[in-house]
Image (tube, grey):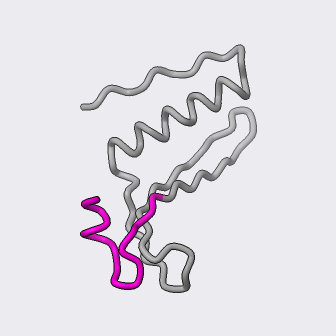
């Protein structure tokens, strides 16, 4: 709600969260994530704000990626979720 008030536009007051994941390398495969808040999503006038340093967002992406790792490699344990610090 606060993000809509701060980052929304007159054209579209609702902002969206966007996560972009780029996979690279082989054995081990690495992933780079980028978190963004996007106003005017899907238009030629998109306005993106980087949110990659947001601790809660990074933690949520970490949980999702750890869960996905369990499905891809069932015999490998996922790392523990880092503590907030």
In front: 32, or 84? 84
37 or 26, nearer to the observer: 37
Task: Give percent across and percent down for residue 67.
Answer: 59, 28
Within the magenta stretch, is there residue 2? yes
The image shows residue 14 at horizontal and vertical percentages of 39, 69
For residue 25, what is the image quadrant? Answer: top right
Q: Residue at x 60, y 16 (%)?
A: 77
Instruction: Tell me residue 46's x, y (percent).
Output: 48, 78
Q: Is residue 21 above or below residue 36?
A: above
Q: How many marks?
A: 0
Query: Where is 50 relative to 45, above or below?
Result: above
Which residue is at a point 51% across and 22% down the rendered structure image? 79
Q: Quadrant of the N terminus?
A: bottom left
Q: Is residue 34 above or below residue 13?
A: above
Q: Is residue 22 left or right of residue 81?
A: right
Residue 16, image x and y in percent? 45, 63
Region rendered in magenta: 1-17
Image quadrant assignment for residue 26: top right
At x 41%, y 43%, the residue is: 58
Q: Going by the image, does 31 lie left or right of 73?
A: left
Give the left or right position of residue 83, taking residue 81 as reference: left
Q: Quadrant of the C terminus?
A: top left
Please tell me which residue is depicted at 44% across the width and 68% down the height of the picture: 38
Specify whether 79 is left or right of 21: left
């Amino acid at each position: 709600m606060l993000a809509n008030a701060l980052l929304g536009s007159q054209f579209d007051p609702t902002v969206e969260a966007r996560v972009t994941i780029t996979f690279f390398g082989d054995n081990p495969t690495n992933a780079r994530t980028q978190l963004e808040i996007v106003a005017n999503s899907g238009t030629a006038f998109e306005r993106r704000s980087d949110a990659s340093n947001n601790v809660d967002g990074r933690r949520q992406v970490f949980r999702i990626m750890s869960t996905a790792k369990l499905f891809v490699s069932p015999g490998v344990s996922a790392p523990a979720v880092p503590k907030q610090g």
